[in-house]
Image (cartoon, coloured by chain):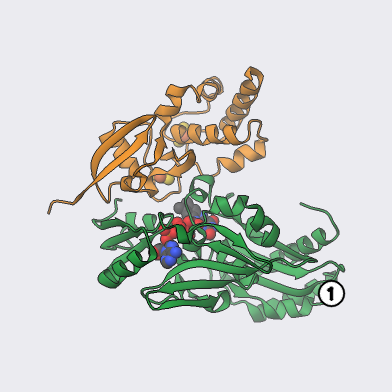
Amino acid sequence: MTEKLYPLTFTLNGSTITRHVTSRLSLADFLRTEMNLTGTHVGCEHGVCGACTIRVEGRLSRSCLMFAIQVEGMTVETVEGLNASGELHSLQEAFHELNALQCGFCTPGILITAAQLLQETPLPSRKQIRDYLSGNYCRCTGYHAIVDAVEQASQKQAERR
Amino acid sequence: MKAPIFDYIKANSLSEVFDLMEKWGEDARIIAGGQSLVPAMNFRLTTPSLLIDINGIEELKGITHSQSTLNIGALTRHYELGTSEEVTKHAPLLSKAVPHIAHEAIRSRGTFGGSLVHADPSAEIPACAMVLDGRFQLQSRQGCRSVSARDFFKGLFETAMEPGEILVSADFDVNEDGYQSALCELERRQGDYATIGVAARAKTDSGNLFDLRLVYFALEDKPILANHAAAILEGSRGDEAAIAAAKTELTKDLNPIGDLHTSANTKLHLAKVLLERVVKNLLKHAKGTDD
Ligand SMILES: Cc1cc2nc3c(=O)[nH]c(=O)nc-3n(C[C@H](O)[C@H](O)[C@H](O)COP(=O)(O)OP(=O)(O)OC[C@H]3O[C@@H](n4cnc5c(N)ncnc54)[C@H](O)[C@@H]3O)c2cc1C
Ligand code: FES
Ligand code: FES
């Protein structure tokens, strides 16, 4: 049986994308397989682990819990887009310096979530950082280094401003 | 896992939704935020043949209020509920619930109406809607009916909704002066579904509790009103003796169901712990200190 294809046009990391997709293709799989944007990781496929977190219309979303077809006409940003725009610069520096990643599987989701936090709350407390990142699992680091890195990045960004 | 094959239609109006529901019957499912439906589809626990996307329907959006009533549209996202000044002012219990619902990436898509219709016994919004005596507007091709929160939740993922109906919005009486509300829950991690929780509201301006309403969640197959315990506390100042008596009385109200992590006995114990916390929280606010 050939599956029905639906037209899809949306903005991805600043460029207009037009494709045909099946209805059941998740946004995460679309980004990885059709767009080769493999920074968006797929862990649990039910919204729990946070590895697939991206931005849709300027807000965080789980790309495993959206079908690609649903972003028709919307603006989507992935970790690659944030990297290119320089938004991740301070965070990347701090994650590197403070060893806030090991295997790196969770890292894109954590970076994009942290970037959103710093956009909303430029100088968050450690509790705010922990609460905001509570939806992102990391099986390696034990989280302390991640909180340290987000805190350091927030301070560096504040100094630069 | 991946979702099975389905057809997808983004509806532009309620009448289009009714047409599709009539034509497809039980094979059609509405998708709002998708934050409960899509996980279930990815696990193939549910396999609809048609998804009707309601995210473009304007009539389901927005928060409005009149002199006496706050109306919350079904498509209000959790984050919108949490940041709405009108909700903070007129139904503060709902604002207090939002930080406990999942995580930012889920709150940005999950909807108020979806949470009510999904009727997860561990969810915060259904319990709060019971405390606040919400009235839900259900519309179908045949017309609109209003069902009170108390009659709406029937059991595990089960509600009073009939086939062909859609939840349009919910009405709440605006918060009266002198009333305080509070929500306490125990969760393994910030944002996880509750291990157990309680939502409450009372008139507390005199320092005594009046018109107290307590609703427990994550305890049985639906939110549970604890009327016996509330009756014991009525008129009291939440002192030790009153709380102890109310804790004993709780056994008449609650019949907890144990789960993978927490036995029924532990849940009952925790229900008592939360009773004390929530009463103190209500009265703490009454004395003018905010948490
Ligand atoms: C990791 C994770 C953690 C979560 N933690 C919590 C939590 O702690 N507390 C909590 O309360 N929730 C939690 N949720 C669930 C979340 O709040 C959902 O958003 C909510 O339960 C369903 O809303 P939705 O808009 O996403 O509904 P959908 O998933 O789109 O739909 C759910 C059901 O409701 C039906 N439906 C939706 N809207 C309507 C309508 N207007 N009329 C008729 N039928 C309708 C759909 O057909 C479907 O059957 C969590 C979800 C995830 C993925
Ligand atoms: S893959 Fe989306 S949250 Fe885990
Ligand atoms: S670095 Fe391995 S999961 Fe976080």
Question: How many marks can you see?
Answer: 1
Residue B163, image x, y percentages: 36, 75
Using residue B62 as the reference point, say whether residue B13 is left or right of it. Answer: left
Which residue is located at x 85 percent, y 69 percent? B239
Q: Quadrant of residue B36?
A: bottom left
Q: Position of residue A154 (x, y in %)?
A: 62, 27
Residue drawn where x is 76% and y is 51% of the image: B291
Residue closer to the observer: B124 or B30: B30
Which residue is under mark 1? B236
Q: Residues within 10 Å of mark 1 (few under 14, many from 20)?
A: some
The relative height of residue B21 versus residue A52 in the rendered view (above or below) is below
Residue at image coords 44%, 32%:
A108
Judging by colour alone, the chain drawn in orange in this rendered image is: A
Could one spot residue A45 in this view of the protein?
A: no
x, y percentage for residue B88?
Answer: 68, 56
- Which shade is chain B? green
